[in-house]
Amino acid sequence: MGCEKNDWYPMWKALNIDLEKHDQLLEAFPNIFTEVYLNSQKNRPKNMAFWDMVVGDIHGIRVNELKNAKDQGKKIIGTFCLYVPDEIIFALDAISVGLCGGTNFSNYASEELLPTNICALIKSALGFLVGRICPYYALTDLLIGETTCDGKKKAWEIFNKHKPIYVVETPQYKERDQARQHYIEEIKSLIKKLEEITGNKLTVEKLREWMIKFSEKRKQLKRIYQARKADPVPISGKDALLVSQIAFYDDPDRQIEMLGKLADELEERVKNNIGVFEKGTKRILISGTPMAIPNWKIHHIIESLGAAIVAEETCTGTRYFQSEFKEFNGNSLDDLIEIIAERYLSINCACFTPNDNRKQDILELIKEFQVDGAIFYTLSFCQPYEMESIQLEKSLKAAGIPVLSISTDYSSDDEGQLKTRIEAFLEMLK
């Protein structure tokens, strides 16, 4: 990626973007980013300049790269969830792009298609597609959905009216042998669909190559998280969140390089006792639903009140890299697919029942990152996470861990109320 400014209007017009609405979105975006990231933070890691640049041209440089790849015959595949293996998509010489929505700006385009009491992520994601606001959606040849919540299951039917979508059925009770076998068969069916779309045939060599590459990407991201165990913490929670968010759609090779550079800098900061907060700052764990760009509200409030977010037990946090391939030595596609299935089913999302392993994940993170208090964050109307948060809150409080549960959406209407509640929670930790 370069730093030059380009005129992307011809590209956006060619992608049939609603330029008027798109202008409104991009007009507001820099102000939000400047307030949340640039004006409110000091002593940020120097390598965060790369991520600032990416956000500064969020619908430009990367979109242009994808368009050029598409013009050369590559297929662009949109995904929404960790349970869709990126390794397979890239091994078939296609490009996967994480698609979601983290703002209520696009809700106007989906409000007549969805009930009011459905999660903000679904409203936002569908609005970006049907409203023709996001060039990443416009570039995709195929969307891949999954059955991780009831809202998504029905939303895919609406998505399919606007863009071809293939739905991977994820198991609900993953501990059963038949559930594991079913997921393996679903992966095989996905491979067939992607082979049909791309015109390519999956090979053992290519799949192993991309399994190793994505494993390296997750390893570098994990290094960044490991550095956050230090006191003083070398990077803010806001910056760490931004790094994870961009990892979902940027080029994997570039991410390996830039994540590695940032991890190197953070490890050097830890050695030299350099932090973005004072030593002894209260340390917070965020647990719950994923946070898509530009959903930075909770992180901004917490860190503006003087606490440090040191870990996220979310899909845009530790779940992204929490499990790894046990090996790469499979001699056949069947072997490698089983290894892939094992890795992805080890991610502990609230879509599964029972889900006791998620509680263990949280308790381990609290210990490893020396957390003073946990905040359970749930998007409004996300039933799996809202229901789990009640039981998890009871378990953590019984273990003597202070907990605050928050349910909110993408709007700014409740920021005052949230600030009051979070401030009272942080005072209690002193």
Image: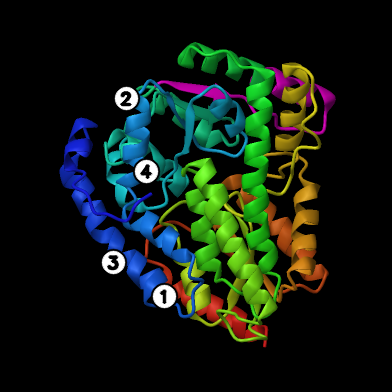
Label 2 environment density (alpha carbons within 10 Å; few <14, some 14–19, many ≥20): few
Residue 115: % across, % down: 40, 39
- Disc 2 from disc 3: Cα separation: 33 Å
Residue 170, x across and y down, in percent: 65, 29
Task: Say if residue 75 shows up in the picture.
Answer: yes
Query: In the picture provided, is 19 more to the left or to the right than 147?
Result: left
Mark 3 — residue?
31
Q: Nearer the viewer, residue 46 or 301?
A: 46
Q: Which residue is mark 1?
A: 416
Colouring rule applied to residues: rainbow
Q: Is residue 80 magenta?
A: no
Amino acid marked by disc 1: Gly
Foreground mark, 1 or 4, reads 4
Mark 4 is surrounded, within 10 Å at the Cα level, by few (under 14), some (14 to 19) or many (20 or more) other residues, namely some
Residue at image location 59% in from the left, 68% down from the top: 265
The three-letter amino acid code for the residue at tag 4 is Arg
Give the number of the mark in front: 3 or 1. 3
How far is the residue under mark 1 from the one under mark 4?
35 Å
48 over 305 or under it: above or below: above
Question: Rounded to the nearest whole Å, what is the CA distance between mark 3 and mark 1?
Answer: 19 Å
Q: Mark 3: which secondary structure?
A: helix
| Amino acid bearing label 2 | Asp
The residue pinned by badge 4 equals: 62
Tell me the distance, in whole angstroms, between the alpha carbons under discs 4 and 2.
14 Å
